Image (tube, rainbow, N blue to C red):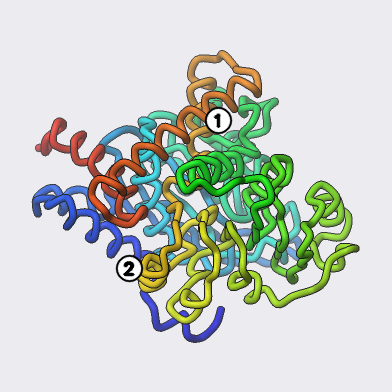
Amino acid sequence: MPTEVLTEKNAYEAALENFDMAADEMDLEPDIRSMIKYPERILTVNLPVRMDNGHIERFEGYRVQHNTARGPAKGGIRYHPNVTLDEVKALATWMTWKCSVVNIPFGGGKGGVTCNPKALSIHEIERITRRYAASILPFIGPAKDIPAPDVYTNPQIMAWIMDTYSMMKGYPVLGVVTGKPVSLGGSLGRNEATGRGVYYTIESTCEHLKIPLKGARVAVQGFGNAGTVAAHLLDSNQGRVIAVNDSRGAVYNSNGLDIPKLMLHKDQTGSVVGYPGSESIRPDDLLTMPCDILIPAALENAIHEDNASRIKAKIIAEAANGPVTPAADRTLESNGIFLIPDILCNAGGVTVSYFEWVQDEQHLFWDAQDVYNRLQRVMKTAFNEVLKVHLDRRVPMRTAANIVGINRVTEATRLRGLYP
């Protein structure tokens, strides 16, 4: 991470600043602010784990439940060396507004373990996962808090959490996590849900701005799950994906990259680097190249105060959580760049997680096209609701999305009252 980014607010401070901006616009009273601004519960767990060499190593894990006024907490678990409690608090806060924006009956939660999964064996990852699941077990459950995959976690890790929880309970509990393998109660369409949601919001934005999707130049920062799916859908609908990067480097072709072949290249080599028919560029240059649509799909703070003025995209679609800092937001807004905020843009994942939870609770499963149709309806409705606030109040799209989300949580909080 560039050293200049360190002078900006961390992710949690940014989440609180964005909340306050929306709350000020809403004239939200202090009593309600104090009830919904901060996390309800924060759990830190120490995880002693026996490594493959026989030694015991200690890891630290977190689970944060930000708000449960509208339903059980919902949010992913990430494994990453840079996981901190503040990061998890920020992600849990964003999850509250995200679930509310797409109007699903969940609150916000998030979890994480500070570790480097790339340096661990599959057996060590399983032991960390089961230890972490056992440690947070009193906090989670289908009616309490429902984890899901996030950065460097996957359906197999969710299966281990589901199994650990079920063994403790004495019977299988499918609905304790989402993002599971389909054979264990996972939903068809879940793996590509975040990227599909990104695509649907980009499609709606292009319709609003009257920018043809056909031939639109697209740059994708982060060729993981969400970035890959969004790029593939845009490519399939005649968008021109000209640049892509991953953790090892970036590739560029002004005429457009062949995304299916690039996906195959990454599967075979582990990276987009070296893809035939492309030229290598600096990852930082990808963010600032002229394009119609920029999709930051990596980690937080990719666009910050020092590079925001050089962004040349017409549309920024936040597939990642918190990729634009508050200082950068102001610069992008003043430059007329249309931003699709993360709590709207990448909400496809939690929406299909909700669909999965519903299917698990009903023991009745849907086909893939049914999932896609329902997801498209939810995402398009949410986009139009946020756009209306943006146009009516003349506020930035991020503030508009927060207003929609905060308003629903506020209504639930007022109706429920204060106990005791």
Residue 104 lies left or right of residue 152; in this view the side is left
- Pinpoint residue 226: horizontal percent, then vertical percent: 62, 49
Q: Which residue is mark 1?
A: 166
Q: Secondary structure at mark 2?
A: helix
| Along the viewing direction, whichever of 149 and 342 lies nearer the viewer | 342
Quadrant holding the C terminus: top left
Relative vertical location of residue 285 with respect to residue 222 in this rendering, above or below: below
Q: Quadrant of residue 415?
A: top left
Query: Depth-wise, is mark 1 or mark 2 nearer the camera?
Result: 2
Q: Amino acid at mark 1?
A: Ser
**For the residue carrying disc 2, how many other residues have a C-alpha within 10 Å: few (<14), some (14-19), or many (20+)?**
some
User: From the viewer's perspective, is residue 243 above or below residue 148?
Assistant: below
Along the line of sight, the residue nearer the viewer: 381 or 64: 381
**What is the quadrant of the N terminus in the image?**
bottom right
Do we see residue 349 in this rendering? no
Element under disc 1: helix
* Residue that mark 2 sits on: 13
Q: Residue at x 33, y 32 (%)?
A: 71
Residue 259: image tag: none
Q: Residue at x 33, y 57 (%)?
A: 396
> Closest to the observer: 266 or 50?
266
Tell me the CA gap for discs 1 and 2: 37 Å
- Amino acid, disc 2: Glu
Q: Position of residue 45 (x, y in %)?
A: 45, 57
- State whether residue 111 appears in this view: yes
Crowding near pointer 1: few (<14 within 10 Å), some, many (20+)? some
Question: Where, by quadrant of the figure, is residue 192 drawn?
Answer: top right
